[in-house]
Amino acid sequence: MLLNHDLAGNTPLLYRCLQHKACWWLLLLTPLLRMVWLVLQGELVNPIEFITHSTGTWALSLLCATLAITPLRQLSGWAGWQRYRRLLGLFAFFYACLHWLTYLWLDQFFALDAIVADLVKRPFILLGMLAFTLLLPLAITSTQGWMRRLKRRWGLLHQLVYPAALLGVLHYLWLVKRDLTTPLLFAAGLALLLGWRLWRWAKPRWGWAR
Amino acid sequence: MLIRRPTDIAPSEITPQAQYLRRREFMALAAATPLLAGEALAALTGKPSPFSTTEALNTRQQITSYNNFYEFGTSKEDPAANAQRLKTSPWQVAVEGEALKPKVFGLEEILKLAPLEERIYRLRCVEGWSMVIPWIGIPLASLLKVVQPTGKAKFVAFETLLDPQQMPGQRTRVLDWPYKEGLRIDEALHPLTLLAVGLYGEVLPKQNGAPIRLVVPWKYGFKSIKSIVRIRLQETQPPTSWNLAAPNEYGFYSNVNPAVAHPRWSQATERRIGEFFKRKTLPFNGYGEQVAGLYRGMDLQKFF
């Protein structure tokens, strides 16, 4: 395993790096820094379209990464993965916020009537908005304080991440003009992540365990 | 009547003399470097046209690096990267069907049919962006007149080259290949309808539809079919690629119309490439004065 100590007892560099939250911050901010860099370079032909697409795909990617933590923990037997779930989830929310703001500001220029008309007429925008709305309470209640306060209901509430991810993928599938390759990749990834959970949940109940 | 164009060549656009004098060096370098050679295009000039807009042009860089040309991939950057392998010479265009004198034209013959003109047109993509592009070409009418359409020629069908070897996008099923487009005969004969062979004072770059493409400035961009090999005059309305792919989203006419939304997005506004704020989209992309008459009495909500 990449992350385990080797036989000589040395800690691998990657592992030492991942122990620092600062490394994760840097890693997770890289897409944003790249976006800012590319836009400032001034060579993008349609920078606003690029920002819209980039923030959207990163929100969805990080949401999938968040959902991958539990299967990773279960498969690897390393409980340490758990420490990074909240950070990943909050960064997914951060990119979703940027995506949402890009739509409101750079696409619609806060024209409320046009936005309302869009929501009524265009299902993919409505789905995106719904997904974002579902993430909102999760971001707010992500603190230790809220975890304590909500007790067992916290886990129940945070199951909202599943419909949010599903709506996010549907939002992507629905808006694409013709080439469905990338949204279908996301759909496959999400199906794998949710399928794994379903399998774990159903195995003992439906007598699938051998 | 002679309509003069304002002299709008900025001093910055003129090649400095020092650079001009070194042009042979550049040509030699270009010949020695395969990638550069693909980029070094022959100069081509057209006489100014009264149909040209005086709006600010988009840059050559914008026009040649942000393209929809699914034969070379579905992302905007794909055509510039993948189209260079297309062999554009020799090139033939078969003009056939309901015509007294059907003929297969070599590209050079087409270039001699009429004096080349520079037409600076707005291009509005169905996706909601637009550009101002200096095309060089001849009116489609000057080609069609040579073959003498019969009375049965009510529509014109166009086809792009079908060659998955050269056009890797055709190995996927993303559209029904070859790419097909069509116009009504009066649209095809309209003086605004252009067969473009050049761009920005040079031979048409491959990612923009070399060696010969259609430009119909009052319709969404996908109507302006690229790398044409066949033009057929016919009595019936021809099937068209995007209409076959999604009939409820892309009609046969596809005139730019801010009042008719795409089922999944509004067409009321557009982003002119290079601008921050969006513009209001104009009916017929601002060419209503010239073309609205073609559609008098038609329900444009129905014939979208």
Image (cartoon, helix red, strand yellow):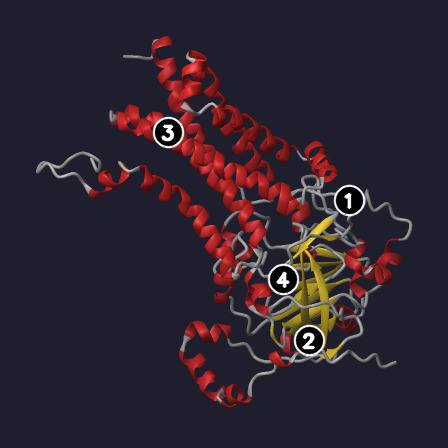
Q: Earlier in the sequence, mark 2 or mark 1?
A: 2
Instruction: Provide the chain ID for the residue under circle 2.
Output: B
Q: Quadrant of the N terminus of chain A?
A: top left
Residue B183 pos. (x, y %): 76, 57
Q: How far is the residue under mark 3 from the one under mark 2?
A: 64 Å
Q: Which residue is mark 4?
A: B226
Q: Which residue is mark 1?
A: B260
Instruction: Kindly state the secondary structure of the residue where label 4 is placed.
Output: loop
Label 4 packing within 10 angstroms: few (<14), some (14-19), many (20+): many
Q: Quadrant of the C terminus of chain A?
A: top left
Outermost residue on the left side: it is A8
Three-letter residue code for mark 1:
Val
Q: Nearer the viewer, mark 3 or mark 1?
A: 3
Instruction: Provide the chain ID for the residue under circle 4.
Output: B
Instruction: Between residue B43 and residue A139, name the one nearer to us.
Output: A139
Q: How far is the residue under mark 3 from the one under mark 4?
A: 49 Å
Co-location on one chain, circles 2 and 1: yes
Q: Which residue is mark 2?
A: B110
A179 left or right of B193 in image: left
Note whether B146 is above or below B152 in the view shown: below
Three-letter residue code for mark 4:
Lys
Residue A95 pos. (x, y %): 49, 39
